[in-house]
Image (cartoon, rainbow, N blue to C red):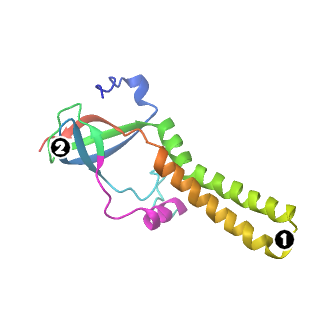
Amino acid sequence: MGNPKELNAENRENRLTAKGWVVSVSGEMAYVSTERQTGCSGCASQEGCGTASLAKLFAPRNRSPIAVFNALGAKSGDEVLLSMEESHLIKHSFMAYGVPLLGLFIGAGLLQFITQAFAMTEASESLTMVGGVLGVVIGWWATKTYYRPEPPVMEKILQAS
């Protein structure tokens, strides 16, 4: 792993940022715990929107630290700023949600086609649902097994410990 490229004003515009604290350092990697955000911070009504409610419902309360390349030499306890390109977030979201959803449609459609081809009309709906569930599971498994997301970049140390 090499040093990340220098972030200038031009390529900072398309980056998402988050504050975090270095929990530990091991070799060239730093393990950073980030703040849990309840919404998208896009408006003043973060607490009342559906996105904030879903974030509270589905986001784990005690998450594992994120492993990032320690290009800045941060030490345990330092407050750091992490960033990632918006396009990476879209790709990560598609892999996490889109592939299992695609599996749902393919699995359900495939088993519906099979039940119609073999004239199994009495079991058609049940098998279609089973196909959808299997498709979601296979899509989730494939993403979890084969996809390796690109970690965020440690942009700067905000406060040294």
Q: Nearer the viewer, residue 101 or 19?
A: 101
Residue at the image position 43 percent from the left and 42 percent from the top:
148
Q: Is residue 3 above or below residue 110?
A: above
**Disc 1 vs disc 2: which is toward the camera?**
1
Residue 143 locus on image (x, y percent) = 51, 49
Q: Is residue 42 visible?
A: no
Quadrant including the N terminus: top left
Q: Is residue 38 magenta?
A: no
Q: Which residue is mark 1?
A: 120
Q: Which residue is mark 2?
A: 25
In the displayed structure image, the side of residue 152 where residue 117 appears, left or right: right
Residue at the image position 77 percent from the left and 71 percent from the top:
125
For the residues labelled 1 and 2, the Cα–Cα distance comes to 59 Å
Q: Nearer the viewer, residue 95 or 73?
A: 95
Residue 135, numbered label: none
Say which amino acid is labelled 1.
Answer: Met
Residue 64 locus on image (x, y percent) = 30, 56
Whichever of callouts 1 and 2 sits on the residue coming sooner in the sequence is 2
Quadrant including the C terminus: top left
Secondary structure, mark 2, is: strand
Q: Is residue 12 above or below residue 137?
A: above
Q: Is residue 42 above or below residue 107?
A: above
Q: Is residue 51 magenta?
A: yes
The boundaries of the magenta stretch are 50-66
Secondary structure, mark 1, is: loop
Please count the marks in the image: 2
Q: Nearer the viewer, residue 95 or 56?
A: 95
